[in-house]
Amino acid sequence: MTKVLLIYLVSSFLALNQASLISRCDLAQVLQLEDLDGFEGYSLSDWLCLAFVESKFNISKINENADGSFDYGLFQINGHYWCNDYKSHSENLCQVDCQDLLNPNLLAGIHCAKRIVSGARGMNNWVEWRLHCSGRPLSYWLTGCRLG
């Protein structure tokens, strides 16, 4: 019940403020509640670093790539492979509409990111994570966050 309430409160706060950004510590709380700390060997700090380098914690970010495909949401999940954006043929491996990855409750994006990370390449699927997070000390991402 606490998990659902926290996610509801965070998403309500974002909706009321018409904000598309989530704070680092609020995101850390949601990620922890969704059991991402240690998921497939990645720490909360890895997930926070990924969200920052991909979207700067912008939940509603959409980016067009050089190949004409689009990346969506906090984790910049690609519409050609992972979600259906109704713009071109999609493998839709996460079985989700790309627009759902922009939802302030974050669950669709988290579940899809978990599916991506569960694959053989893990977080190496994200070029920005490889360039800016992999193999680096990341514990500072949790500095000042109060996690339960």
Image (tube, helix red, strand yellow):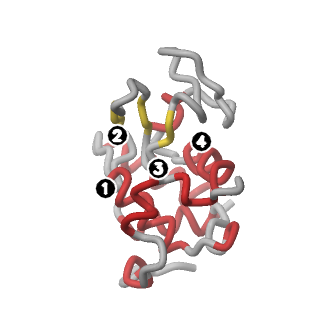
Picture coordinates of residue 90 (x, y %)?
A: 60, 23
**Numbered mark located on residue 56 in the image:** 1
Proximity of marks 2 and 4: CB atoms separated by less than 8 Å: no
Q: Report how many numbered discs are placed on residues in the image.
A: 4
- Say which label, 1 or 2, has the lower sequence index: 1
- Say which label, 3 or 4, has the lower sequence index: 3
Q: Secondary structure at mark 1?
A: loop
Select label 3 or label 4 by which is in front: 3
- Say which label, 1 or 4, has the lower sequence index: 1
Proximity of marks 1 and 3: CB atoms separated by less than 8 Å: no
- Say which label, 3 or 2, has the lower sequence index: 2
Label 1, label 3: how far apart the Cα atoms are: 9 Å
Residue position marked by numbered label 2 in the rendering: 61
Q: Residues within 10 Å of mark 4 (few under 14, many from 20)?
A: many
Where is 112 relative to 128, above or below?
above
Quadrant of the rendered structure where residue 144 is?
A: bottom left
Residue position marked by numbered label 3 in the rendering: 75
Question: Mark 2 is on which residue type?
Answer: Lys
Residue position marked by numbered label 4 in the rendering: 108
Q: Residues within 10 Å of mark 3 (few under 14, many from 20)?
A: many
Proximity of marks 1 and 2: CB atoms separated by less than 8 Å: yes
Quadrant of the rendered structure where residue 23 is?
A: bottom left
Label 2, label 4: how far apart the Cα atoms are: 15 Å
Question: Mark 3 is on which residue type?
Answer: Phe
Q: Residues within 10 Å of mark 2 (few under 14, many from 20)?
A: some
- Say which label, 2 or 4, has the lower sequence index: 2
Q: Secondary structure at mark 2?
A: loop
Question: Mark 4 is on which residue type?
Answer: Ala
